[in-house]
Image (tube, rainbow, N blue to C red):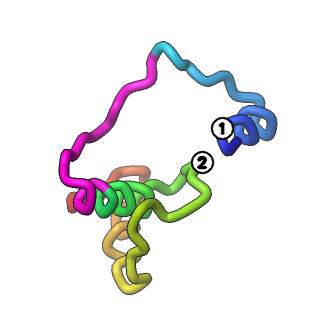
Amino acid sequence: MAVTNHIARHNHVIDWEGVKVIDGENNTALRKLRESVAIAKERRVMNRDEGGYQLSPIYRPLFTAGNQSGSKPAL
């Protein structure tokens, strides 16, 4: 539903053939944490939640610091 809303709102065409997995993790708990960190680091997301793990707001500056130009800080 979020993708459909994004397409309708921004008139974007999704390149389904060019979709790629950006990261992988076999450990479920670690995968949920990594997902939440990736969502927190991204400035423009379609995600409607914070991922599988709710990060404390105290960490937010770490994920957004130096991200003014679109670059992502290392974790």
Can you tell which mark lies on residue 39? none
Asked which quadrant contains residue 60, the reply is bottom left
Q: Is residue 44 left or right of residue 12?
A: left
> Mark 2 to mark 1: distance in Å?
7 Å
| Residue at figure coordinates x 60%, y 48% from the top left | 46
| Residue at figure coordinates x 43%, y 82% from the top left | 57
* Position in image of residue 49 (x %, y %): 56, 62
Give the vertical position of 54 relative to 28 (above or below).
below
Amino acid type indicated by mark 2: Met
Residue pointed to by mark 2: 46
| Residue at figure coordinates x 19%, y 46% from the top left | 26
Instruction: Report the span colored magenta.
Output: 18-31
Residue 19 colored in magenta in the image: yes
Q: Quadrant of the N terminus?
A: top right
Give the vertical position of 27 relative to 1 (above or below).
below
Amino acid type indicated by mark 1: Val
Circles 2 and 1, Cβ within 8 Å, touching? The answer is yes
Asked which quadrant contains residue 13, the reply is top right
* Position in image of residue 14 (x %, y %): 61, 24
SS category of the residue bearing label 2:
loop
| Residue at figure coordinates x 61%, y 57% from the top left | 48
Residue pointed to by mark 1: 3
